[in-house]
Image: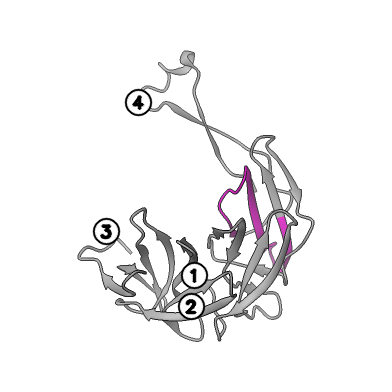
Amino acid sequence: VVGPVVLLMSQPVLGSLFAGNPYIESRGADTLLGVRLPETADAFNGKIYLFGGDLGHDSLTDQIQVYDIATNTWRFARGTLPYPMVGNGEGGAVWGGKIYLSPGASAAGWGHSSRIIEFYPVTETAVEKASFGADTWATSPMTIGNYVYWMGAAGFGQEDKIWRYDPLTDTLTNVANMAGIGRNTSAIAGSNGLAYAFGGQYMGTERTDIDIYDPTTNIDVLSPTSLPYP
């Protein structure tokens, strides 16, 4: 398993060889553990964190791997996850110098968990926080203002809920429902302060819906356009 791909500007002498493409790919250092479907977080303070993952043969890990972008090196974090887990390529949301993760599938019979995981890079410790109230997975968090949001998820069913988490009070609230069909999603926050849920999956069927949620009005609407393909 290779580490993250780093894009480097090509040297002038290579310019004529890569006309129209001023970038080349460079292989980073290999990860310490070969994992499939890791729960990942965005780069934070010059480091990239890989949380857990599937080691193959249904064996999960609770290890947190830390990649230093400047030195192109990997090491294990001082702490571990609350339980061995695997995500579905979900990301993390950064707020107040901490990274917030969705619950993941656990090693205990591939069951699931219901609680948000908070990772503090300074101490490299991960703890469980507020609960969604039911098993929840296959969803990504996003930060808007002073809150962390989730839109849709897999669970006992395909959730159409929108959750708002207040890190200061450790309170998770179902603030609204998606206008589109309930589904597991990967969602991001737009630069205009709106939250977008792109596509997803409902009961094994790929979706093209785009939900747009406005936290200031607590209203979610469907985009007049949809993804070009499932």
Measure the C-alpha gap from mark 2 to mark 4: 42 Å
Q: Position of residue 101 (x, y in %)?
A: 58, 66
The reply, left or right, for residue 220 in relation to residue 21 is left
Q: Amino acid at mark 2?
A: Ala
Residue beneath the point at 58% across and 48% down:
43
- Front position in the image: 97 or 117: 97
Depth-wise, is mark 4 or mark 1 nearer the camera? 1
* Sequence-first tag of 2 and 4: 4
Residue beneath the point at 36% across and 59% down:
193
* Sequence-first tag of 4 and 1: 4
Q: Amino acid at mark 1?
A: Thr
Q: Quadrant of the C terminus?
A: bottom left
Q: To which residue does mark 3 refer?
A: 228
Depth-wise, is mark 2 or mark 3 nearer the camera? 2
Depth-wise, is mark 2 or mark 4 nearer the camera? 2
Span shown in magenta: 38-64
Is residue 161 highlighted in magenta?
Answer: no
Residue 194: mark in rendering: none
* Sequence-first tag of 1 and 3: 1
Measure the C-alpha gap from mark 2 to mark 3: 23 Å
Question: What SS does tag 2 mark?
Answer: strand
Question: What SS does tag 3 mark?
Answer: loop
Q: In the figure, 195 relative to 67: above or below? A: below
Is residue 224 something one can see in this rendering?
yes
Q: To which residue does mark 2 refer?
A: 154
Q: Amino acid at mark 3?
A: Pro
